[in-house]
């Protein structure tokens, strides 16, 4: 954490909103990104990210400066998004249903082919995340996009390391199965347990 | 080794030593299920890592500032409203008790009750009208004056009212003593 950031935090702790706004400016992208991956729409992500920063500002007195500010604010954003998903049962919308989409070419300089490819990628990501439960989804988002270790995920989501491992194991298996289905849409997916049993009997 | 062990290594992206790595490679060649699981997890990781990073629209921190100010104003209004209500109720009770004390000597109980109810009703009407006048002033005041000053004003007014009540009681007592 740089000195300037520590100064902003110290000033924010005395009630200086402008100092906190600088922290908002600095961390808006990772916080928004977590909310977007969790909630799936720009509108919900904007609202959740804003709310996460409001909660962070209101709780700044309780922020322990020995901890990373990024981890702390991402923890607030993840937990808020989990609550939102549980409360409203927000479902990740498919790209076709997205009205406010920033998914329409993110970069105007992109060729139509590249833009279509990007759009397809995002569609695939959202379909992989849709089937995961809220906490598993948060663990996946933090691991893949924020390079969090098991311990950091455990700290952020208030879980034990072993719980994080078993959640990620389950989530990655589910995503792999879904991915295989997506790659072979015409072949009906065989139930994984059945496949496992067949395999195990063949390898014994 | 059991198939499940390889599956765990693949799904948890476990760091393997040389022997374990060789074991896994041998198993992958024999087992199509682990092979496709291995491929799928790699493709997913690649897809995730190479996806565009979502970004908020420009002006995010300005929007946060506006939203934060609204949240704070709402909270301040609530605190102010509660404080004013408490002060009003306290003043009402104080005035009623003074009213009872002053009239206790001359009135008999039913008349006293009737007068008390009338007094309370008049106070409610008075406070309602006062609120209609004062609340727009407060709304403007909230924007211009810090809540600390508004509290100070509220408490000073109730202090003055209390002092006035006490002096009234005192003067009544002196009057009674003089008459007797
Ligand atoms: Zn296998």
Image (cartoon, coloured by chain):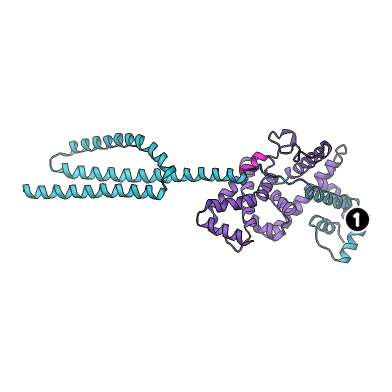
Quadrant of ligand 1 in image: bottom right
Badge 1, how many Cα within 10 Å: few under 14, some, many 20+?
Answer: some
Q: Is residue B175 left or right of residue B65?
A: left
**Residue A108's x, y, as percent?**
76, 38
Numbered circles on residues, count: 1
Q: Nearer the viewer, residue A15 or B78?
A: A15
Q: Is residue A46 magenta?
A: yes
Residue placed most toward the observer, B102 or B30? B102
Asked if residue A12 is among those painted magenta in the image, a careful observer would answer no
- Pick the front one: A35 or B143: B143
Magenta range is A41-47
Image quadrant occupied by the N terminus of chain B: bottom right
- Chain painted purple: A
Say which chain tag 1 marks. Answer: B
Q: Nearer the viewer, residue A7 or A196?
A: A7
Q: Which corner quadrant of the image does residue A112 belong to?
A: top right
Q: Residue beneath label 1, please? A: B28
Q: Which quadrant of the structure image shows residue A97?
A: top right
Principal secondary structure, stretch drawn in magenta: helix
Examine the rendered structure and indicate whether residue A101 appears above or below residue B177: above
Left or right of A160, for residue A10: left
In the image, which lettered chain appears cyan? Answer: B
The x and y percentages for residue B179 are 6, 47
Which residue reaches farthest left? B180
């Amino acid at each position: 954490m740089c000195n300037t950031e520590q100064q902003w935090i110290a000033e924010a702790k005395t009630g200086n909103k402008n100092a906190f706004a600088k922290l908002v400016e600095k961390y808006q992208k990772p916080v928004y990104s977590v909310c977007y991956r969790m909630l799936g729409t720009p509108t919900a992500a904007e609202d959740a990210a804003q709310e996460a920063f409001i909660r962070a500002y209101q709780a700044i007195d309780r922020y322990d400066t020995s901890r990373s500010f990024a981890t702390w604010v991402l923890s607030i954003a993840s937990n808020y998004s989990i609550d939102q998903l549980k409360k409203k049962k927000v479902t990740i919308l498919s790209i076709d249903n997205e009205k406010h989409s920033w998914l329409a070419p993110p970069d105007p300089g992109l060729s139509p082919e590249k833009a279509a490819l990007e759009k397809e990628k995002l569609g695939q990501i959202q379909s992989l995340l849709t089937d995961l439960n809220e906490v598993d989804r948060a663990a996946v988002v933090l691991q893949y996009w924020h390079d969090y270790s098991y311990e950091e995920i455990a700290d952020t989501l208030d879980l034990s390391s072993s719980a994080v491992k078993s959640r990620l194991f389950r989530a990655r298996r589910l995503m792999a199965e879904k991915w295989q289905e997506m790659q072979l849409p015409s072949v009906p997916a065989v139930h994984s347990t059945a496949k496992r049993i067949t395999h195990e009997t063949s390898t014994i | 080794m059991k198939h499940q062990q390889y599956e765990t290594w693949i799904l948890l992206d476990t760091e393997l030593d040389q022997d374990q790595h060789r074991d896994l490679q041998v198993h992958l060649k024999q087992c199509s299920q682990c092979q496709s699981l291995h491929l799928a997890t790699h493709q997913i990781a690649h897809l995730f890592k190479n996806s565009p990073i979502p970004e908020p629209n420009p002006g995010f921190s300005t929007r946060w500032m506006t939203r934060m100010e609204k949240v704070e104003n709402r909270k301040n209004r609530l605190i102010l409203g509660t404080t004013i209500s408490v002060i009003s109720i306290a003043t009402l009770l104080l005035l009623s008790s003074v009213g009872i004390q002053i009239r206790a000597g001359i009135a008999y109980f039913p008349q006293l009750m009737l007068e008390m109810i009338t007094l309370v009703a008049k106070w409610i009407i008075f406070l309602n009208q006062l609120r209609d006048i004062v609340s727009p002033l407060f709304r403007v005041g909230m924007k211009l004056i810090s809540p600390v000053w508004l509290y100070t004003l509220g408490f000073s007014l109730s202090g003055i009212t209390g002092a006035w009540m006490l002096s009234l009681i005192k003067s009544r007592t002196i009057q009674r003593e003089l008459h007797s």
